[in-house]
Image (cartoon, helix red, strand yellow):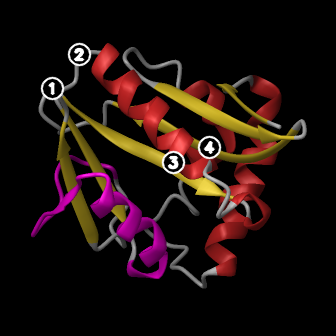
Amino acid sequence: MVNIREVKESDNPVLSQLIKRVFEEYDAPRDGTVYSDPTTDQLCDLFREERSILWVAELDEKIVGCCGIYPTPGLPADCAELVKFYLSLEARGQGIGKSLMEINIRSAIDFGYSQLYIESLPEFDQAVRMYEKLGFSLLQKPLGDSGHTSCSVWMIKELA
């Protein structure tokens, strides 16, 4: 059974390992991405920021994914970034990603955001296709200052 809950301190090492494993699985760039970002090891602390949240997905009480909303510096006040969206191999294809996306979109609206921004990589093309199906459109250049300079796919969605 799937359970989606807010991040807690004890999740930090498991989430960091899960995120890095996805990068390794897809042979995605490590430098200039969340892989080498020091905040990846302390996600619970990062998401104490006002108007942010990180949701954690558990399958049979095992952490299998995460996704959050974050007010990335440099974004307009009404725009948040959808961040840290990663699923373990065993969690894919079961609707868990879609459930995480839906709860994050609701959270963004509840926080008062009117837009959601995403940065990604070509290696994560399955996720990019899902973003497109959910109404995200491609941008020609990045917004904000995430510090993830290797990301080359930028997308935005207007929230209802």
Query: Which dot marks residue 112?
Result: 2
Measure how far apart labels 1 and 4 are at the Cα level.
23 Å
The amino acid on which the numbered mark 4 sits, given as a three-letter code, is Cys
User: How dense is the environment of label 1, judged by Cα within 10 Å: few (below 14), some, or many (20 and up)?
Assistant: some
Which residue is labeled 4 in the image? 66
Question: What stretch of residues is rendered in magenta?
Answer: 122-146
* N-term-proximal mark, 4 vs 3: 4
Measure how far apart labels 2 and 4 are at the Cα level.
21 Å
Could you tell me which secondary element the residue under label 4 belongs to? Answer: strand
Measure how far apart labels 1 and 3 are at the Cα level.
23 Å
Label 1 with label 3: CB-CB less than 8 Å: no
Label 4 with label 3: CB-CB less than 8 Å: no
Q: For this rendering, which residue is in front, 128 or 141?
A: 128
**Which numbered disc, 1 or 3, marks the residue closer to the eye?**
3
User: How dense is the environment of label 3, judged by Cα within 10 Å: few (below 14), some, or many (20 and up)?
Assistant: some
The amino acid on which the numbered mark 2 sits, given as a three-letter code, is Gly
Measure how far apart labels 4 and 3 are at the Cα level.
11 Å
**Which numbered disc, 3 or 2, marks the residue closer to the eye?**
3
- Residue 73, by quadrant, is top left
* N-term-proximal mark, 1 vs 4: 4
User: Residue 150: horizontal and vertical position, in percent?
Assistant: 37, 73
* N-term-proximal mark, 2 vs 1: 1
Q: Residue visible at 12% across and 33% down?
A: 76
* N-term-proximal mark, 1 vs 3: 1
The amino acid on which the numbered mark 3 sits, given as a three-letter code, is Lys
Measure how far apart labels 3 and 2 are at the Cα level.
21 Å
User: Residue 141: horizontal and vertical position, in percent?
Assistant: 12, 66
Label 1 with label 4: CB-CB less than 8 Å: no
